[in-house]
Every structure is written in structure tokens, then in C-alpha cells.
Image (cartoon, rainbow, N blue to C red):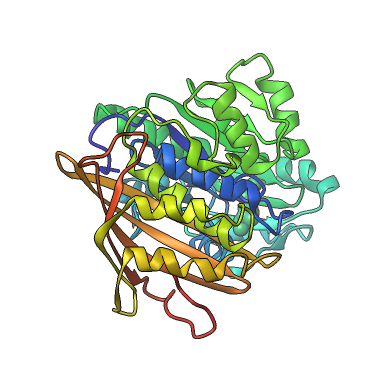
Amino acid sequence: MDRLAGNARLMIVSDLDHTMVDHHDPENLSLLRFNALWESNYRNNSLLVFSTGRSPTLYKELRKEKPMLTPDITIMSVGTEITYGNSMIPDEGWVEFLNKKWDRNIVSEETSKFPELTLQSETEQRPHKVSFYVQKDKAQDIMKALSTSLEKRGLDVKIIYSGGMDLDILPQGAGKGQALAYLLTKFKAAGKLPNNTLVCGDSGNDAELFSIPDVHGVMVSNAQEELLQWYAANAKNNPKIIHATERCAAGIIQAIGHFNLGPSTSPRDVMDLSNTKMEKFDPAYEVVKFYLFYERWRRAEVEHSERYLANLKSVCCPSGTYVHPSGIEKLLCDCVNSLKTCYGDKQGKQFRVWVDQVLPAQVGSASWLVMFKKWEQSGEVRQCCLTTVLLSSEDVSVTQGLTWVHVHQTWLDGAGPNSQTTWLF
Ligand code: GLC
Ligand code: MG
């Protein structure tokens, strides 16, 4: 929450399943496109918030399966759990607030009287969330009856139907929308309201996000019937909400462009990155660009041309070194040379590279220290290095680009060395 000194340029609050993450795209292309856009243009000055129905357990599973970025704030279990930063520190104030007029035992007792309700797995039952499956055609009637019986027992609850199968019971003050409103109130009190907020969703539990005042919203093209119905009944005259024509994360990128919230061209959509016109030195963009080139080189998606390697060498400081995660030290120029032999070695294979949490810090009048996590997925094997790069603008023009002075990598805990793969950068 305190990462940014000022107001965020943009805060994206996005659902995960079928919104940020497309479960029908095994290549994860739209997610990877979003990642490159976010890391090159927004990470440093904006806030990424994931808001999912998943419990912490299932959220962590998804992160292992898909090339997801690390959010600044994670809202889980349908807006009942809010956590901050990489170590996911819980918001205790939110927990306290949700305890009002809530008694899980009464919910369990009352719901057990409905044979149409099938309890979801144990991991999805949370302190402020009780979840079931229920058939689509029975959902409306059951929700009505449940709400009456819980009210009679003195509880003030919210019942949400999502994805044509999931039924969640939460305290009335909970939900994705309420959790966002709570965050916005906190930001306001600290004088740090984001300049713009974009909410993104596809299903019933996302509807509330779209009713928060002053936010922009995108329902991705593949949004569920229940969300589109809610929109038709409640928000169709709101020009700040669109139904994208693109699926999942591509719909989010589309909305950034539609509402003019900032740059909306992902570096992944630019084929020749060596020609990009820069207005100022941009260390984050430099890092994203390099690793995209590296992926394309190994997938043989760029021309097999010496020109690229010569360009790369020209931005390496002649005495610059690279400390490999194994501890071996090499000259940066030698590393570029070793790229020669691996052109196309991943052609036609599953091979993706992405960077997460690219955070540059200016450490001198002409130098930046950029820290980030560099991920590489090759087939089933996924590895990650905490990476530090020292870049310099001494004696070079913006068009020439920053000079790479030093690169240092350390295996990320639990995502370390693997004998089957070669780690080059
Ligand atoms: C996620 C959760 C599930 C919940 C659903 C809808 O799938 O795992 O418990 O019912 O979202 O909110
Ligand atoms: Mg969803």
C-alpha cells in the first residue's frame, strides 16, 4: 500500500478466472501481452489489484499454473480477505468490520436444510464465506428462500451467484465491490486516491465492482450471462462501462485504450523493438524489451541476423559483467556471443519469458538499478531469478539506449536450478 509516494496513475482491479486469466488459451498470449504492457509502462507508478473468488489456497495454485504478475494488493474469497504486498499481509481492519452481524454456524445450520446445495471443497470455506454449487434453474428460488431464512435468524448476508454454478454467502458488508470501496476510502484518507481506476470482470461476483462510483469498468467479451443481465438492468447508460470485443486480458488492454487511461500498446505487439522511438531513457522498457527479444530469438521469431547481436553488444559496457545464478562470472559481451548458438533452439516448443515487478531506482545522475523477477517457462519446467541490472545513460543518447553495466541473478526460492535446462540470462 505504501509502495507509491504519490497517487497511482492507474489502479487496475481485476478478477482472475476468465478475466485476467484465459483458461481457453494454453499459450496464455493475452496474459503475457498484458504483463509486458504493465511492466514496461505502469508497474512503477500504478497499482495492480487482483480480486478473485478463490481462497488463498486456490489463488496460490493458479499462480503456479499461469504466468501471472505479482499484484500490489490481493483480494480473495469474494472480497472477504484483503492482503498487501508480496508477503500478503492481511488487513485486520477489514476482518473486524466483517465480523459484524455474521455467524458462520447459523449459515451452516440454515443451508443444511436445502438438499439442492452442494458444499464446495473445504479450502473454499473461509471465515467470512460459505460456498456451494447449485444448478442454474434452481438458483433464483433457493437464493430467495435462503435470504428469508437467514434474515429470520438475525443475520444480514449477501448471496451471490456466479458462473452459472457457484453460490456464495457472505456478510452483507463483504463482496468485491465493498472491498474496493473500503480500499478507496483508505486511499482517500491518505490523500492517495488513484488518478484512475479500472475494474475488470466476467461473472456475477464482479457485478458490484461496476457499481462503485467514478470507476471505469470493462466486462470482457466472454462475460457470463448473469453479469450481462445485471449490466442491462443496472448500468447500461453508464458510459464508463464497456463490454469489450476482446477476450480476457486482451479486453483489459482494449479498455485502457478505449478510456485513454495511458499507453495501450503492449511491447509484445511490436515486432521490431529495435526501432521504437523513445522520448526519454526508460529503464523498465529496456528490460522488458531485452527479454522479449531473448524469447523471440530462441523461438526463431525474429530474423537470424547478426545485426541484432551487434546492437546488443553495442549497449553492453565493454568491461560489464554478468553474475550467473550459479555464481559464475562472465563478460556481458561473451554472453551475447553465446546467444549465437541458441537461435531457434526453442522453435515450435513451449517457451515463454516474462518479467515481474520491474522496479527501477535512479541511483545517480546517469544510472539506474533495476530489480525484477525474470521467469522462464520451457515445457513443464518453470524457473525464476531475482535479477538486478545496473544501467547507465553516461555518454549515450536516448536513441542509442541505456548501457548495460552489470547483471546479477539469484535463484528465487523454490524456483531454482534444473538440470534439464540451460539458463542463459
Ligand atoms: C471461485 C471460488 C469459489 C466461489 C467462486 C465464485 O471459484 O473458488 O469458492 O464460489 O469463485 O465466487
Ligand atoms: Mg471470473
- Asked which quadrant contains residue 2, the reply is top left
Q: From where the camera sits, is residue 208 visible?
A: yes
**Is 315 on the left or on the right of 423, as rendered?**
left
Q: Position of residue 80 (x, y in %)?
A: 47, 49
Farthest residue in the left direction?
Answer: 364
Q: From where the camera sits, is residue 169 visible?
A: no
**Is 70 on the left or on the right of 346, as rendered?**
left
Q: Position of residue 306 (x, y in %)?
A: 52, 56
- Closest to the observer: 248 or 60? 248
Farthest residue in the bottom direction?
Answer: 419
Image height of 321 relative to 287, above or below:
below
- Closest to the observer: 279 or 225? 279
Image height of 173 relative to 379, above or below:
above
Image height of 148 relative to 328, above or below:
above
Image height of 261 relative to 3, above or below:
above
- Closest to the observer: 152 or 26? 26
Q: Write the residue at 64% across / 50% down.
A: 29
Q: How many marks?
A: 0
Q: Write the residue at 38% across / 55% down.
A: 313
The quadrant of the rendering that contains the N terminus is top left
**Is 202 on the left or on the right of 185, as rendered?**
right
- Closest to the observer: 307 or 155? 307
Q: Position of residue 355 (x, y in %)?
A: 44, 55
Q: Write the residue at 20% across / 42% down.
A: 394
Q: Write the residue at 24% across / 31% down.
A: 190
Q: Position of residue 3 (x, y in %)?
A: 27, 44
The quadrant of the rendering that contains the C terminus is bottom left
